[in-house]
Amino acid sequence: MELSEDELIAAIARLRSADEPGVVVGLGRDDAAVVEAGGAHVVLTTDLLVERVHFDRSTISAHDLGAKAIVVNVSDLAAMAASPRYALLGIGLPADVEAAWVMELYGGVADACAEHAMTLVGGDTNRAGLVVLSVTAVGEVAPGRAVTRSGARVGDRIVVTGSLGAAAGGLALSDGTPAALSEPWARALVDAHARPVARVGEAQVLARFGASSMMDLSDGLTTDLARLCAASGVGARIELDAVPVAQALVEGATELAIDPLALALSGGEDYELLATMAPEAVAAARAELREVFGVALTDVGSIEETSGIVGVDASGTTAPLAPAGWDHFRTR
């Protein structure tokens, strides 16, 4: 396909001239859709996990795969400051998959749903050439309280939760460095890729401290920040030495033959939160996330009036940062 993923979504969105009544956040505009239903605001998202694109059965357990299918959708709900409620799972299965593998997969789904107080309420099954999982997740948020990508303001600070790059490092290991898997850093990277965490409570803390925009980091910091800036009509300045690179990635850099910072900027599948907020709110939000969740909140830059994203290194040298993250139509 000649279009990138973002270009395809934009082209599909242009087929609609306007949102229908009751649509608060519509097609292609954010991590999830928001609709009105009986006075409440319902948040809806769906995500595909496709064998040989997002995972290989030889490198992830069925349980971890089922849990991940739920968690990556919960992460989209979290990015809107929504509370998860329900899920549906569609699954396509090739002929060589055994019933025991499917039961293990659904065990992972059940465990992830229980962790996030969700109920699996339906789905579909079908034959397919490869394993395909399609989850639809439903959440709720108080009217007017959904945090979108489009609210970033000039002067806001850019913050991220946790650390970045570990999941991409785990993918790199699964793609061909099996000898390293006995090392603690390698196991940490593989776990980050196979067992992501959805920052539901953390997102609600950031919303309470006035986050002006927010999204989850599924496709890499540079790509997702570019999407946030485009939605908000602003630019960004990233302080490269402030980017929280995962320690396990730093430890495995030589073995993996990668630049840890480059992978932290563009690797994808971290499912950490990217948010913007007033400078005076950052310290208090950071303290609460550390105290309640044991999660770091790092200030990595600022929202600027000019368009585009620039990176600033420790010497003060600036250079444009082009989006270089995951694209389902141009990756692997």
Image: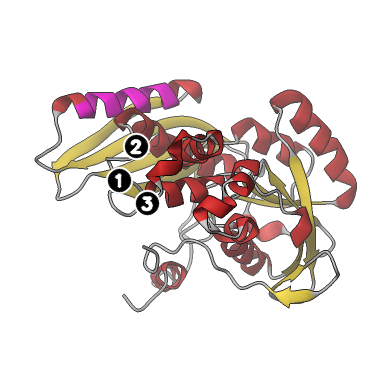
Indicate whether residue 108 is drawn in magenta.
yes
Q: CA distance from mark 2 to mark 1?
A: 7 Å
Amino acid type indicated by mark 3: Gly
Amino acid type indicated by mark 2: Ile
Name the residue that disc number 3 marks: 176
Residue 69 visible in the displayed image? yes
Q: Quadrant of residue 25?
A: bottom right
- Residue 225 rendering spot, x and y as whole percentages: 64, 61
What is the crowding at mark 3: few (fewer than 14 residues within 10 Å), some, or many (at least 20)? few
Name the residue that disc number 1 marks: 56
Q: Are the residues at dot 2 and dot 1 in contact (C-beta closer than 8 Å)?
A: yes
Foreground: 15 or 275? 275
In the image, which residues are magenta?
101-112
- Residue 17 rendering spot, x and y as whole percentages: 45, 71
Considering the numbered disc 3 on the image, is that residue within a helix, a strand or a loop? loop
Instruction: Determine which of the numbered discs, if any, sits on residue 60 in the image.
Output: 2
Of the residues under marks 3 and 1, which one precedes in the sequence?
1
Residue sitting farthest toward the right: 280
Of the residues under marks 3 and 2, which one precedes in the sequence?
2
Horizontal relation, residue 322 to residue 295: left or right: left
Q: Quadrant of residue 194?
A: top left
Foreground: 273 or 104? 104
